[in-house]
Image (spheres, grey):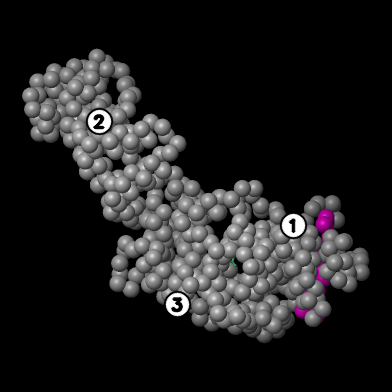
Amino acid sequence: MNKNKLEYRLRIAPSPTGYPHIGTVYQALFNYAYAHKNNGKFIVRIEDTDRTRLVNDAEEVIFSALDWVGLFEDESPRKGGEFAPYRQSERLEIYHKYAQELLDKGLAFFDYYPKTDATGKKKDYSAVAKTATEHTDIPPAPATVSDMLKSQDWVLRMKVPDEGTITVTDGIRGKITFDYKQVSKQILLKSDGYPTYHLGVVVDDHLMQISHILRAEEWIPSLPKHVLLYQYFGWEMPVVYHTATLRNPDKSKLSKRQGHTNVNWFREEGYLPDAILNYLALLGWSHPEEKEIFSLQEFIEKFDLNDIRPIAPIFDLTKLTWMNQQYIQNMSDEELVRALKRFYANDPDISHTIELLETNSNSKNLIWGLVKTRMEILKQFKQLAGHFFQEIPVEKSEMNKQIAQSLEKSLTDIDSWNNENILSSLKQILLNYKIKMPVLYTIFTGEPKGLPLPESLVILGKDKTLARVRKYL
Ligand code: GLU
């Protein structure tokens, strides 16, 4: 652990470059859980030093996603904390100081990197890892970092030994050896004065006294550079754990082209935050008693960093959806009503339906019984139950008119308005017209499928059912 050896301090360090990614929530969950397990702190640092990839509201949407799943941080740009600022773009002077330290120690060097190439084209210095040697008339190198910043034609790179190997340790995979020939002389400070990820992450993890680093395996290749930098500064390095990349069921890397990766998508579909966290916890970890459904609190108690497995976890939407359904079924009616109200807050019709459901005790139990057991995600509520209290769209056609005439006749004749009688009426109509259930569903509910139709019509009542049928006449 880090020098104070007192506190567990874990962090995520997202870059605000787009929509809130499910992988960020995954990392947040494991870091949060381990911090909380050990009465430590969970920190969110915003790594916004790649100015070319910044997206305006990306920081905001990251926090909104974390709030939604309930992984609240202890320190961050918005919360502040002992080690503020937590946004890297506000820490440039700090990086300049440490860049100068490496230069003074002879462990970093300036590389000529003019803003534009010979044709006047702007260079993307952030992407370049090799030393630029193609220049012939190189001006004298700056003497200090602040001179470098004035000219903006230079970058600062780290020195890397030419020969030999370096062995690094990953908490999940053990020792990994790299040949120095594979390790680039990484740019640490770009000519615009911003650090690259590598300088920023090492300096900040050290200064913010991060005790354990847990992040995605895509950063393993950076590890030798980071280990070297820790050595150069003479700092003790935290243990680093790299989780395996989330995969689609076909084993390809989870990407937005193949699956859903935007947290907002899950939110809009009506997945429950608790179900999402439960599902993510099982990717790369398993409950010691092989349990599938457990709370965040239970995860915090049972989880250990050393139990993470390096095998690539499959993100399977079908499984998550199943889990979501389990969560819905296990909710009390009151909890479900609350969740639905939040979910449909911007949909006045359906909010109204939910309120009616709450107050109309006659149909309430029946509907809850029918809906609750069938709803996988909250979005389906509207499709399943919306029509009970709403005008339904009426699609007039000759065919519908004829069916409606027959329906009116046979339903009017029913004396005892119950499942059995309604069902036999409907069956007869299906046979006579050689049609399938979706046609009848659409006539009665405006949707091609839904709750069992006879039960639904019992709830709706004979008068309302007939009134719907008559709209087609
Ligand atoms: N800024 C990096 C990212 O966007 C952080 C990687 C790390 O956790 O060190 O993923």
Residue type highlighted by circle 2: Tyr
**On the rendering, which quadrant does ligand 1 occupy?**
bottom right
Mark 2 residue crowding within 10 angstroms, few (<14) / some (14–19) / many (20+): some
**Callout in the foreground (3, 1):** 3
Q: Distance between the Cα atoms at labels 3 and 1?
A: 39 Å
Please give the label number shown on residue 441.
2
The quarter in which the C terminus is drawn is: top left
Say whether disc 3 or disc 1 marks the residue closer to the N-terminus.
1
Say whether disc 2 or disc 1 marks the residue closer to the N-terminus.
1
Closer-to-camera residue (168/326): 326
Does 347 sit above or below residue 270?
above
Closer-to-camera residue (57/429): 57
Q: Is residue 208 left or right of residue 352?
A: right
**Callout in the foreground (2, 1):** 2
At numbered mark 2, what does the secondary structure look like: helix, strand or loop?
helix
Look at mark 1 in the image and give the residue it sits on: 124
Is residue 240 shown in magenta? no
Q: Which stretch is magenta? A: 106-117
Residue type highlighted by circle 3: Asn
Is residue 108 shown in magenta? yes
